[in-house]
Amino acid sequence: MDSQPNSPHVLIFPFPVQGHVSCMLKLAELLCISGVHVTFLNSDIIHRRLLRYNDVMSRFSRYSGFRFETISDGLPPDHPRSGNRVVDIFDSIKMVTKPMFRQMLLPGGCLNHMNNRPLVSSIIADGIMCFTIDVANELGIPIYLFRTVSASCFWAFYCIPKLIESGDLPIKEDDEMDRLLHGVTGMEKYLRLRDLPSFCRTSDLSDRAFQVVTSETQETYRANGLILNTFEDLEESALTQIRKHVPNLYAIGPLHGHLNSRLEAQMTSPPRSSNSLWEEDRTCMTWLDEQTPKSVIYVSFGSMTMLSRDELIEFWYGLVNSKKNFLWVVRPNSVAGDGQTIPAQLLEGTVERGYIVRWAPQEEVLAHPAVGGFLTHSGWNSTLESIVAAVPMICWPYYADQQVNSRLVGEVWKLGFDMKDICDRVVVEKVVKDLMDTKRDELARPVDRMMKLARRSVAVDGSSFNNLNRLIEDIKQINRSCNKTVTTHPCFV
Ligand code: UDX
């Protein structure tokens, strides 16, 4: 649908890493389909990689109301921007990017010049960049926050002050990591100290990453609303708790399924909407075509995980010894000590039954009939993609929300096994065999049920479908009142 000159204009501003940019671009496309003007603000470096490895420009050229803008993340080009250095990105954005962002939004700034487009009528910013609320408030622009993590993880972050008050945090040296916590309402029966977001694993409350996630989460209430990439049937309990503190909540996920569903309603063969920041190696699809149904375990630890060489070798032995066929994504520069000699047994085992790529078209891989299991780091996008594709998971969480997600997958939803904090070839071999053979039938029913619920949520009249429509209506309503009322919004200065 084409946007009209008087349609609302939403500025979307993600935190510049793969998992955030990718799902916020899906939201951008969903808004474009509904006739909303969207400006998507990327960091320079992310934007260059997005254009290099994708056809986003031709995909988005269908929407007359869409455009990209770019901004610096303030870091030098050779900074690794990996999971173990994520705090550098937070700090740099707050210090360097924030003043630029404000400048760009001022009248005459590149985000707010007329040029046949309405001025920005609302902002959807990544919820771990709450400085955007200060800028939006100063300029009188309504702002919604989008958190890319699960509702359950958001809720655990929200409860951190309570966990400090009860003495559960900071973690002490002799703490029993398997002890249940009582401070995260609704999760008392299964959330252990071990399952708290990785940033809580510190004995120092002034730890920078811990401080950032705690304070950013507490500020959410200052926004006009909170958008989450989840659905009511999956995380009803956490959503209910969050609503007590942030009443205007929109659960609109799984976003990739939602986008596919709305595109399919419009056209017979919608284009693939990959937002990869690495070049996808599509030869793995041909390799998958040669495998028998549900025979392959897909292995990927997402976009930020760093493995030690020992961990790589343990996984590798576990996979080869399981005698299952495997497709493994080993991202460039993701293994410390890369380039060292690999034992011949592993190389031979891989030639026989494995296929290794640097980056895969993951959504398509998971949807391939040959894939019967997913060994994952439990990133939230990967978890949702696996749910929609009805693929059971082995979870080996690395950081952030992944510790929470993996607990839910293993203990609550029963969609797989949580292998948290263990990286041992014997365990890997056993869990892979369990997932692919011994316990396959046990997992089949919950996996199938959740896939159906996910798909139902984004179909017409499903909960996420209705929540997205409500968000779009609210954005339009704000635009209408902005056009009527004299405010400090730049369009009236
Ligand atoms: C991290 C967090 O863990 C996540 O929960 C948070 O919401 C965003 O930041 P990341 O490590 O990137 O995310 O994992 P994930 O959220 O799973 O996102 C990875 C994305 O990359 C997925 O959409 C996946 O489909 C894609 N991917 C991964 C590929 O397209 N190809 C690959 O080879 C690997």
Image (tube, grey):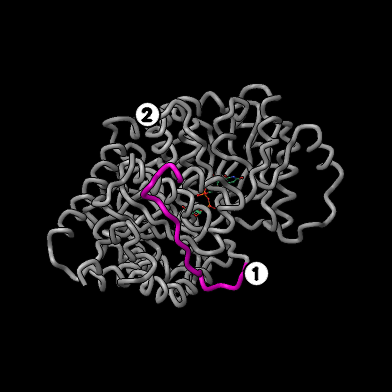
**Type of amino acid at the residue the image marks with label 1:** Asp
Query: Which circle's residue, 1 or 2, is located before the other in the chain?
Result: 1
Residue furthest to the left: 485
Pointer 1 with pointer 2, Cβ within 8 A? no
Mark 2 highlights which residue? Answer: 265
Q: Residue at x 39, y 37 (%)?
A: 258
Residue 195 visible in the snapshot: yes
Q: Which of 255 and 434 is in front in this view?
A: 255
Residue 164 appears in which quarter of the rendering?
Answer: bottom left
Q: Residue at x 24, y 56 (%)?
A: 246
Mark 1 highlights which residue? Answer: 78
Q: Give the range drawn in magenta.
A: 61-79
Residue furthest to the front: 116
Left or right of residue 415: residue 167: left
Residue 65 falls within the magenta-colored stretch: yes
Element type where label 2 sits in the image: helix
Q: Which residue is drawn at 21% across and 55% down?
A: 479
The relative height of residue 151 versus residue 490 in the rendered view (above or below) is above
Left or right of residue 12: residue 82: right
